[in-house]
Amino acid sequence: MTELFEQAVKTASTLPAEMQDEIARMILAYANDDDPLMELTPEEEADLLEAQAEMERGEFATDAEVQAVFSKYRL
């Protein structure tokens, strides 16, 4: 294990369990683990397919729409 990876694991180990699991899922996905880490519900899959179709059609949020979302959720 490299020093950087060791440092990342040490830092991640101080986070709440939920965040540690999310980091573990990302590492496993990046390492091409064969086990599916997440299964989409039929609704989530439909949303994803619609989002991909919107991207293919060039339908993106305007700068004003993006700014409105950032303003709404900014702390």
Image (cartoon, grey):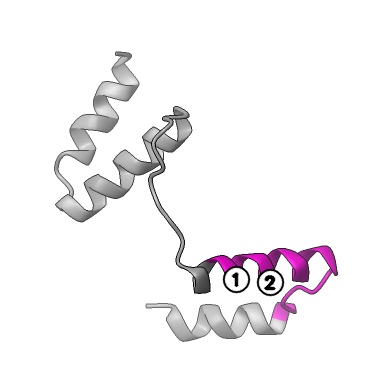
Task: Give me the C-alpha separation between circle 2 and circle 1.
Answer: 6 Å
The quarter in which the C terminus is drawn is bottom left
Q: Quadrant of residue 36?
A: top left
Judge by depth and name the residue closer to the eye, 45 or 70.
Answer: 45
Circle 1 residues within 10 Å: few <14, some 14–19, many ≥20: few
Tell me where residue 28 sits by quadrant: top left
- In the displayed structure, does residue 67 sit left or right of residue 5? right
Q: Which mark is residue 21?
A: none
Q: Report the residue marked by disc 2.
A: 50
Q: Residue at x 72, y 77 (%)?
A: 61
Please, what is the three-letter code of the amino acid marked with disc 2? Glu
**Toward which corner of the image does residue 64 lie, by quadrant?**
bottom right
The answer to whether residue 73 is left or right of residue 7 is right
Q: Main secondary structure of the magenta part?
A: helix
The answer to whether mark 2 and mark 1 are in CB contact below 8 A is: yes
The amino acid marked with disc number 1 is: Ala
The part of the chain drawn in magenta is 45-63
Q: Is residue 63 above or below residue 57?
A: below
Q: Which residue is denoted by mark 1 in the rendering?
A: 46
Foreground: 38 or 1?
38
Element type at mark 2 = helix
Question: Residue at the front extreme?
Answer: 42
Helix, strand or loop for disc 1: helix
Q: Nearer the viewer, residue 20 or 45?
A: 45
Q: Residue at x 21, y 37 (%)?
A: 11
Residue 1 % position (x, y): 29, 13
Is residue 31 shown above or below 67?
A: above
